[in-house]
Amino acid sequence: MTPMAAEPLDDVRRLELVFRCSALDPALSGVLLFDLDPRLVRPVAGLFAAILGEPGRPAARVPLGAATREEDLWTTSRLERQRDGFAFSVAPGPLMAGTGPPPLAVVPDLAHLSFAGTRAAVQLVGADVVCVEQPGLRLHDRPRARWLAVCRSEDAGRVTPHLLDRFALRLAVPGLRTVPGEWPPMTSATPEKPAFSTDEAVTRVQEILGPGAGPRRSLALARLARALATLGGHGEVTARNCDDAARLIGLRITEPPPATDRADGETPRLPLPSPPLPTSGEGTRRGARSEKNPRPADEPPLLAPGAAQGVGAAPGAPAGTPYPEDEAVALREFTPLRNPWQRRSGPASVRGTVVGTRRARDLRDLALVRTVREAALYQRVRGHTEFTVAPADLHSNVRAPAPEHLLTLLLDHTCRGDWDWQDALTPFLQWAYTTRAALQVIEVGGAEAPNELRAESFAARGVLDPRVLAALYRAKGRATPLAHGIEQADRVLRQAFRLQGSTLAEAWLVVVTDGRGNVPLQASHTGRLQGPVAAQGVEDSLAAAAPLAALDRGRLRVAVVDAARSPYGDLPFALAEKLGATVVEGRAGHGG
């Protein structure tokens, strides 16, 4: 489908043509939009996904940004039910989907794309084949994903050329303000056979780009011309299709072909808009740098006022050009496709929980609220017309050191009668002391509990906290909400692994109990005990322990200290089996 309107195409119509060409030819899988309003990224991506998809089934969108990791792109884990239980399997990631509409990778800011996302774009965009070698997955296939990236023209110099060259379709849309709800319907079916490129088209591509253009730009323009000819129902690619492709992406036609009478049956040229002429001089070649020294007559006067320019803008980049990196003045990274030698989340001073503020010594980890509040106190004294922050106003956060080890103690006070569990807990307490581990103490069955139907817990920075010693010698009570205590231990460990991430190197869960939970989990949640309990409390304890077995056992170790009470001496072993824990002998040489 080729537009036949008499007036020049607007940005919305140009977007439609570019998206349809990308959907038609996998070699044009990368679309790069310059100076797109950030508020329009989502609707534009939705329209691209609608073109790639089927009626009522748009293509899946894969957002990529500064936090994208390798695990988010190449593989995905699936939980499958088998005859003997459940098992995890590894399948291709969202960018390697093999069925349905091709996925759409959306990059809202190409200049801030992560290392993993950059490497994926370099490997996939416009590639004929990709090889994925990941643990549990080996895949050789042709990439089907389409890429939609957005970048500011002044940031083009910061992006590595390896990444920019992968995007064959480039469009500058600084004037785009609104996007319709849906594209106009296609008036004809897409031809099955692509148009044939002629020698005339190849020659015209070289004339448009000039001798300074690289092979990737020549191939991109030639493929775009072929896609436009295919959409128009032509069997061959002519020079006019190349001119239409150049106007579509914003290239200036310096030497238009001579006007000739159109033969019968020949399709008229696309009425595409021409970009503004560059102001730095004439004779600019497409694909090469413009002249650095303009003619004296066109040279601006010294210190002449000019248009305002944003921070970090690249001077000299002509507006509307699809290749603003040719004129950008910016420093690029030496190894943009390689991770830093030391991967860390930052220095130790910016990790951990915020416990206060202090006057800043540098610009790292600033306490913004305290800084603004401090500056607001002196605005009238300083006499500035605008809000001003002085160096003396800057404050930084004071953080507690992030612990690398964690000990979680679950103490069942009702199981301690005529024995002292200090001997059984000493090895774990010594480990916590020598490793400076943080402690989380969960108590059930204590005589001083505010609500005997619920477990109580507190966090301590170390073993020397006085509350830890008091918890070890708490008097026993009547009720044993063991299921609620195990539920709290599960929540504490999951939160620690989620918030601290790789900082948490090792964690221990030590459960001291006889397994006789006599408070159902519902009673702990509601605070009311209704009817006889029977074995419901024990069953709830075993059910609450099952999710803990699925945690990361590379860093988590679990132990159950057996109180060796009778009858029902097998309950601690049943609990240990659910937890996937080892059983530690609590009191040796004593009967029930």
Image: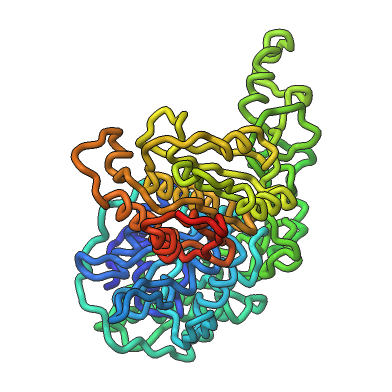
Foreground residue, 255 or 68? 68
How many numbered marks are there? 0
Foreground of the two, 142 or 260: 142
Quarter containing the N terminus: bottom left
Please indicate whether residue 60 sits to the left or right of residue 288 in the image.
left
Furthest residue in direction top, as rendered: 381
Residue 74 is at least partly visible in this image: yes
| 269 shown above or below 466 | below
Q: Position of residue 145 (x, y in %)?
A: 42, 74
Left or right: residue 337 compared with residue 216: right
Q: Position of residue 460 (x, y in %)?
A: 61, 38
At 62% from the left edge and 55% from the top edge, which residue is drawn?
504
* Residue 204, visible in the rendered structure: no
Colour basis: rainbow
Residue that appears at 39% across and 90% down: 196
Q: Observer-nearest residue: 230 or 335?
A: 335
What is the quadrant of residue 527 in the picture? top left
Q: Residue at x 53, y 80 (%)?
A: 135
Query: Which x, y percent locates residue 126?
Result: 50, 78
The image quadrant of residue 367 is top right
Seen at 58% across and 56% down, the residue is 508
Answer left or right for 571 relative to 418.
Answer: left
Q: In the displayed structure, does residue 187 sit left or right of residue 492?
A: left
Residue 333 x %, y %? 73, 62
Residue sitting nearer the eye, 335 or 546: 546
Residue 315 vertical placement versus 574 (above, below): above
Q: What quarter of the picture does the C terminus occupy?
A: bottom left
Q: Is residue 198 above or below residue 186?
A: below
